[in-house]
């Protein structure tokens, strides 16, 4: 069998083919490893990869299928894991020399969930330093002279070039949406508290989210359905009914969705081609889109987000700062030092504003199914010394709202230009349904 094309299968199609016996997990993993051998030198998406260990997992899963045992929704499908997410059988070094050689003794909750669903844990993808701003080694797969974004750079790049169909990342500001936008893939940040974070590097309890990268919305739904759950070790998760992401995403909306177009206070910082592209999309959507002005309370969310993020980072990374500050990047040291300088009053005030801002935005969803806004100011900036500006993601992260990058547009030189769709808290599955409607409309016309 010619398996050269298998690395480009979606996770949904791959899982179905394995379940039906059309292909084996070993064939799929070998195809992905072949693709990695072809392009990893140029892209540099991986920080740990043991091909034989990946194949060993695949062979064991193939044996389970032959024995007639129950198969999980991701049975035999390879998944990349951002290197801040613990894996008991692989190092987790968090993108810093301070954690070199660290190998956890247990899986993070999300890794355990993936294994329970039958996934092959392919390896660890590159993160920026402690999931902050100092870049890792990954190159943008669309143009190696441009940033891939951060901090989940390796995960976004690995999915974009067909190394794996799915990868996990994280977002404390814009670390899923931005690299997804720059690399040209779907990137989904669920509602805060839906996906447990136990076993993941903690920067900010208030702001940390786990996210997913894929090449189709259906794959985003499939992966998300496996990852939502309550874990008593993550105090922000709650027991809740299973969310049928796959079924809801596949439904046709009961009525054509109405979209609120949000420029945000940062619109003047968007590039001209971004502004022109969004004007075209708004024109295409016609009476299904209306421009929305954010409530006044949202305008200071960037400031409040920074206060919370840096104060909580300073607490959670205190040991790294005390013992190894000379081996931290200048940008991270500056963040931690600012975090140490905030007063308790400033921190508590920033925390206290979250419900107010969230409520102001929630009222918009009485009128709109989703909000449309840029994922970033423009295409991936040139150079590798920066991961780009996350500011277009900040408000939605601050409020813990679900957000999705849609890779539907292209800018200068063919670089991806991200479109971000945002939904109300806990409206995650409906957001994916609206996104699918939008992709089938706008996306098909722009392809």
Image (cartoon, helix red, strand yellow):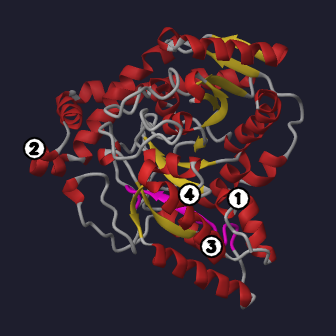
Measure the alpha-carbon separation of dots 4 and 3: 18 Å
Seen from the viewer's position, the closer of residues 70 and 271 is 271
Measure the alpha-carbon separation of dots 3 and 2: 42 Å
Q: Is mark 1 on a helix, strand or loop?
A: loop
Question: Is residue 272 highlighted in magenta?
Answer: no
- Closer to the chain start, of discs 1 and 3, is 1
Q: Residue 21 carries which label?
A: none
Measure the alpha-carbon separation of dots 1 and 3: 17 Å
- Closer to the chain start, of discs 3 and 2, is 3
Q: Mark 2 points at which residue?
A: 326
Main SS, magenta region, reads: loop
Q: Which residue range is magenta in the image? A: 72-85
Frontmost of labels 4 and 2 is: 4
Quadrant housing residue 360: top right
Task: Say whether marks 1 and 2 touch (CB < 8 Å).
Answer: no
Q: Name the residue under label 3.
A: 118
Q: Quadrant of the C terminus?
A: top right
Q: Where's residue 286, x and y in %?
A: 82, 14
Seen from the viewer's position, the closer of residues 307 and 83 is 83
Task: Please indicate, yes or no, whether residue 113 appears anywhere in the rendered image.
Answer: no
Q: Answer with left or right where residue 341 lies relative to residue 409.
A: left
Frontmost of labels 1 and 2 is: 1
- Give the residue drawn at x 44%, y 64%: 108
């Amino acid at each position: 069998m010619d398996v050269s094309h298998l690395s480009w299968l979606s996770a949904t199609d791959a899982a179905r083919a394995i379940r039906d016996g059309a292909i084996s997990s070993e064939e799929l993993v070998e195809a992905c490893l072949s693709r990695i051998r072809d392009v990893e030198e140029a892209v540099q998406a991986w920080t740990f990869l043991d091909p034989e260990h990946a194949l060993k997992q695949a062979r064991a899963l193939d044996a389970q299928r032959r024995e007639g045992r129950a198969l999980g929704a991701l049975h035999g499908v390879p998944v990349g894991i951002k290197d801040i997410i613990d894996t008991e059988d692989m190092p987790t070094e968090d993108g810093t020399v301070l954690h070199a050689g660290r190998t956890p003794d247990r899986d993070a909750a999300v890794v355990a969930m993936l294994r329970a669903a039958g996934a092959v844990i392919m390896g660890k993808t590159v993160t920026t330093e402690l999931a902050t701003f100092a870049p890792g080694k990954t190159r943008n797969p669309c143009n190696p002279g441009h940033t891939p974004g951060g901090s989940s750079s390796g995960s976004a790049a690995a999915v974009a070039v067909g190394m794996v169909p799915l990868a996990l990342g994280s977002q404390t500001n814009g670390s899923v949406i931005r690299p997804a936008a720059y690399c040209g893939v779907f990137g989904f940040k669920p509602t805060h508290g839906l996906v447990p974070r136990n076993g993941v590097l903690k920067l900010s309890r208030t702001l940390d989210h786990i996210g997913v990268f894929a090449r189709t919305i259906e794959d985003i739904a499939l992966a998300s359905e496996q990852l939502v759950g309550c874990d008593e070790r993550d105090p922000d998760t709650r027991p809740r009914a299973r969310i049928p992401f796959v079924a809801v995403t596949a439904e046709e909306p009961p009525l054509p969705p109405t979209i609120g177009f949000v420029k945000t206070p940062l619109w003047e910082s968007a590039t001209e081609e971004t502004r022109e592209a969004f004007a075209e999309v708004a024109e295409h959507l016609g009476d299904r889109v209306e421009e929305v002005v954010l409530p006044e309370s949202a305008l200071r969310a960037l400031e409040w987000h920074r206060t919370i993020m840096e104060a909580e980072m300073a607490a959670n990374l205190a040991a790294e700062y005390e013992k190894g500050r000379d081996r931290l990047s200048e940008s991270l040291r500056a963040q931690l030092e600012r975090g140490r300088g905030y007063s308790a009053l400033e921190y508590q005030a920033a925390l206290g504003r979250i419900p107010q801002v969230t409520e102001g935005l929630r009222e918009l969803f009485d009128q709109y199914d989703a909000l449309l806004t840029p994922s970033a100011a423009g295409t991936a900036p040139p150079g590798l010394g920066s991961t780009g500006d996350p500011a277009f993601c900040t408000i939605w992260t601050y409020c813990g709202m679900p957000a999705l990058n849609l890779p539907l547009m292209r800018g200068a030189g063919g670089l991806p230009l991200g479109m971000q769709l945002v939904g109300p808290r806990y409206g995650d599955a409906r957001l994916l349904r609206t996104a699918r409607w939008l992709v089938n409309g706008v996306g098909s016309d722009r392809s």
